[in-house]
Amino acid sequence: MTRREPLAAGSSAPPSEIYDVALLDLDGVVYVGPDAVPGVPEALAEARTAGMRLGFVTNNAARTPTDVADHLTALGVPAVSDDVITSSQAAATVVSGLLAPGARVLSVGGPGVAAALTAAGLVVVDRAEQEPAAVVQGYGPEVGWVQLAEAIVAVRNGARHVATNLDATIPSPRGPLPGNGAMVGVVTAITGEEPLVTGKPDPAMHAECVRRTGARRPLVVGDRLDTDIEGASRAGAASLLVLSGVTEPRTLVAARPDHRPDLLSADAAGLLTAHPAVVADGQRHRCGRWTVGPAEAEDALILEAEGPDGGEGPDDGDGLDGLRALCVAHWARHPADGAPARVIARGERAAAALDGWGLVPDGTAA
Ligand SMILES: [Mg+2]
């Protein structure tokens, strides 16, 4: 495998011209709640015009692939069910490999969970007394105490606990809300049994999407480090992190090695633009007009921008060059582990940038 140095190389041409298939996460990438991320349907249409094909890979187990495809089409991203892979399908594939055909499985989650299990030849039940051999738990906004209690009793009676994914949160217009991982945590807290997890970051879904599309150079596009980006790392695929979902810049800076993406953009329109490289110059790292270098204080970095303080300059790119430089500089010091960065701002622009990324300045430099 070639040496991977996340974010450093950038992309001299738009990713839509370099990669043949985008493996797109949905929540926080194409839509947040019911609505499209502004500009993303138009950007995806343009990427398709440039020759890029699109596959949709979601850890959200609540809906069937057909429902998801219909939603995408209504938002202006035409899709058919075969373009969509859900973590419910991944769970059904795994469970049908563990159990005999016709085995009983307790479904906890939205209609997508039960539909995938039925399609895989399993018999869906809803009560622990029906002696299911497995419990498959996926996200569904209707999941409540009654379903969780059935799951707990079934697992305690020996059923295998399978989770479609462990995303702790889902993005919403009101901020992060409980995801499947939070609800799975209720069951594991009582049973003490660790579930088998089948969605991202397990690479099976990305691999299935590559198989269906015949992708030769896939690019994973996602908003979560511990599912999308880790899944891409495990699959050996390139990745683009978008900031339209759950990941905050300060979380990205502190990411561990397998959570570091190859490319970064505000949203999926980053498929259509070149991405600047981060250039190392001795101990300093430069991206656009931003520079990150070592501070006198041990372990700290100094962030600064060229040019006058004030509004964004014409060469400020997409506003993320400083963050790119900071990530690469900090990661160079932490090649094997994630750690929060200590950053000193030099000048008002740098102080404002750190504030915008949710990073508390470690001080200011003259
Ligand atoms: Mg997401």
Image (spheres, grey):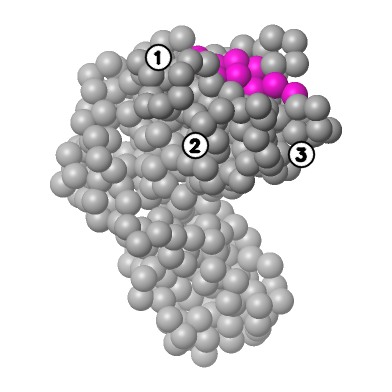
* Residue at image coords 39%, 42%: 244
Q: Are marks 1 and 3 in contact (CB under 8 Å)?
A: no
Q: Position of residue 151 (x, y in %)?
A: 54, 80
- Which label sits on residue 337? 3
The residue mark sitting in front, 1 or 3, is 1
Mark 3: which secondary structure?
loop
Q: Which segment did they paint magenta? A: 285-294
Mark 2: which secondary structure?
helix
Q: At label 2, which amino acid type do we have?
A: Ala
- Labels 2 and 3: the sequence-earlier one: 3
**Residue at the limit of the structure toward the right, as seen here:** 298
The residue mark sitting in front, 2 or 1, is 2
Label the magenta part by its dominant secondary structure.
strand
- Labels 1 and 3: the sequence-earlier one: 1
The answer to whether residue 290 is magenta is yes
Residue labelled with disc 1:
315
* Residue at image coords 50%, 35%: 353
